[in-house]
Amino acid sequence: MRECSRISRRAALGLTAAALSLSTATDASAATVIGGERLARSGVQVRGASGLPKQLTARSWLVADWASGEVLASFGAHRRLAPASTLKMLFADTVLKKFGRTERYTVTDADLADIPAGSSLVGIKPGITYTVEQLWQGVFLRSGNDAVHVLSHMNGGIARTVAEMQAMAQDLQALDTQVVSPDGFDHKGQISSAYDLTLFARHGLKDADFRGYCATRTADFPADGKKTFQIQNTDRLLTGAWGLKAYDGLIGVKNGYTSHAGNTYTGAAVRGGRTLLVTVMHPADGSNAVYEQAAALLDWGFGAGRSAQAVGQLVDPLSEGGAGASPAPGHREARAAAGPAGSASERDSPWHLAEGAAGTLALLGAGAWALRRRRRATGAAGATGTPGPGKAPGTPGLGKAADAADAGGKPGGAGTGRPAGPPETRPERAAPGGRRRR
């Protein structure tokens, strides 16, 4: 059954807040740097460690400690770029807990009518009944825009889902992100940043279902009648494919590619009880470069990066008492965070609304954020954004390795007794009946 989600309440709150002047919120976002002022500077940001990989061609990247939230190194952390399917992490953060995994849904033609041409698909067909678990496997393993659209229609439609995603982004303090569609497909004005994508992953990995889905390598997916076919995860660092080895300790999270965005990737890995997050956006090279550079940054983080001192902080959600905005940098530094002059990141303000109905509803989430921000303005202004080492507030022990997903790649759910932190990766068996069945 559907739950009355916090995001829905946030969107409803926006109805009362929408009348507020958004100029105040715009000024606040321009005058602060979420996560610390160093993240607004140009060039590589690292302190207390050396040996960063030399062949990094990405336009933006970031390495952070999952438990403490400390940013260990970054380059263009707040540069606004097209996210491609890594935006599906925010979709999962927003919608995942609304439906039980065993809930069943029969797909209609209308559920699939608004999928953009050229989308990645898992192969959903109208008239077939799917479980919610199978739909999420389609999202995480195959990056299926058809699965995203079905879940969005279950959630009340595309426009409502976009508005709720925007509200969730504001609550997570992902102020570089502008949502136009729930699937990450190329749309004018749809942008995010390495910092924001890392926030989405960090938040999602607190949830057992999210962890289980993004760590699943293979699953059986319904076809016509009682037949099934096997689907494989497209994350090459997770599975080892296209000439790459599976990365030791990897636990997900999400890859993406579009012709406009190029390759994007956010990953998480555990070694020695420590979990690191990495995001790489738009490397100059194609094919495996996004994975190779992500792996190299993880290697650095687990090696030479152990001595690194934080250059920034992954902030906590506003709904959990997060502040995280550093004292305002100069105008030049604030512009540096947004990317080079003339880029889409500068032309599209973080408060630029999405077009059409989706944009109107996104305003509701923005209004809710503005109201919360106004109430918290005093506390946020004095935060440094770079607290000392330690566990994330309110989440004791999350730096420890936890159990992996159920055998066969089935994700764990509520009531399983699993810890709330990211699991260690263990070899998974292929899903039962793994060969293609006709």
Image: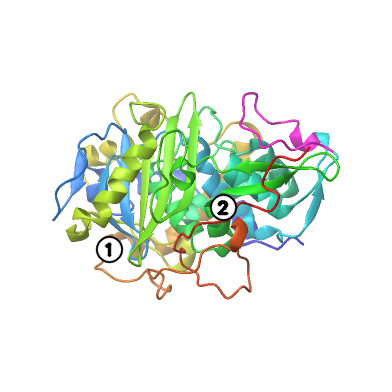
Label total for image: 2
Residue 144 seen by the camera: yes
In primary-sequence order, the first of circles 1 and 2 is 2
Residue located 34% across and 71% down the image = 391
Q: Nearer the viewer, mark 1 or mark 2?
A: 2
Of residue 279 and residue 157, the one placed in the foreground of this image is: 279
Q: Which mark is residue 382?
A: 1
Residue 392, x across and y down, in percent: 37, 68
Near mark 2 (Cα within 10 A), the count class, few <14, some 14-19 or many ≥20, is many
**Mark 1 burial class by Cα count in 10 Å: few <14, some 14-19, many 20+:** some
Residue 107 quadrant? top right
Colouring method of the image? rainbow
Whether 431 is among the magenta residues is no
Q: Mark 2 is on which residue type? A: Thr
Q: Is 125 a magenta residue?
A: yes
Horizontal side of 431 relative to 341 (left or right) equals: right
Can I make out residue 78 in this image?
Answer: no
Vertical arrangement, residue 135 with respect to residue 260, above or below: below
Q: Main SS of the magenta segment?
A: loop
Q: Does dot 2 land on a helix, a strand or a loop?
A: loop
For badge 1, the amino acid type reads: Gly
Residue 200 at x, y = what percent?
A: 47, 52
Which of the 4 image quadrants contains residue 393? bottom left
Depth check, front residue: 80 or 358: 80
- The span picked out in magenta is 110-126
Q: CA distance from mark 1 to mark 2?
A: 42 Å
Question: Residue 216 bears which disc, if any?
Answer: 2
Residue 159 percent across, percent down from the top left: 66, 40
Mark 2 and mark 1 in contact (Cβ < 8 Å)? no
- Quadrant in the picture for residue 290: top left
Foreground pick, 99 / 433? 433
Q: Residue 399: x and y, percent?
A: 37, 68
